[in-house]
Amino acid sequence: MPKYRFEFMHETDAAPVVLELADVEAAKAQAKQAMAENVLDHVAERQDPSMLSTRIYDEAGNVIATVDFHSVFPQNQVEELPAEDPSVKRSG
């Protein structure tokens, strides 16, 4: 199986990951799954996930795809949060 290298743009502390996968489509699917999980982590930490992106390279070092926040969560599918209810009191 071919090897694919994943580089996580805008994340200075994330080291590249190399995986053996069946084909380019499997690499893209892997990147989309990782993106979805990373978005959850960013939201939990109250960080903006919209700038996240992952570049996928083949064994020769060529960029074969880029998966970003908007390719996983298209603009028309991102729901806006409801307006905050002023009668609800927040702790802290």
Image (cartoon, rainbow, N blue to C red):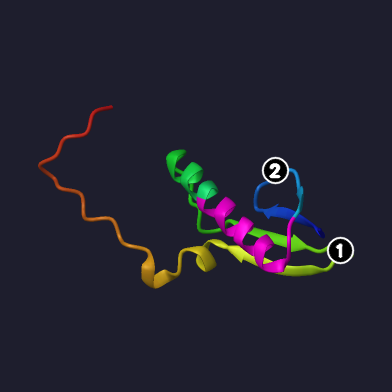
Residue 78 falls left or right of residue 27: left
Q: Looking at the picture, does residue 20 appear above or below residue 42?
A: below
- 38 or 90, which is in the foreground? 38
Q: Tell me the amino acid under the disc marked 2.
A: Ala
**Magenta segment: does it hold 24?**
yes
Residue 82 falls left or right of residue 19: left
- 53 or 29, which is in the foreground? 29
Q: Secondary structure at mark 2?
A: loop
Q: Which mark is residue 38?
A: none
Q: Which mark is residue 61?
A: 1
Residue shown at 45%/69% (left/top)? Answer: 74
The magenta-colored residue range is 21-36
Residue 24 falls left or right of residue 32: right
Residue 36 falls left or right of residue 17: left
- 19 or 80, which is in the foreground? 19
Pick out the residue farthest to the left: 87
**Magenta segment: does it hold 3?**
no
Residue shown at 52%/47% (left/top)? Answer: 37
Callout 1 environment at 10 Å: few (<14), some (14 to 19), or many (20+)?
few
From the image, give the main secondary structure of the stretch colored magenta: helix
- Between circles 2 and 1, the one closer to the viewer is 1
Callout 2 environment at 10 Å: few (<14), some (14 to 19), or many (20+)?
few
Q: Quadrant of the C terminus?
A: top left
Residue labelled with disc 2: 14
Q: Position of residue 9 (x, y in %)?
A: 68, 55
Q: Position of residue 50 (x, y in %)?
A: 51, 58
Q: Looking at the picture, does residue 28 appear above or below residue 89?
A: below
Residue shown at 79%/62% (left/top)? Answer: 57
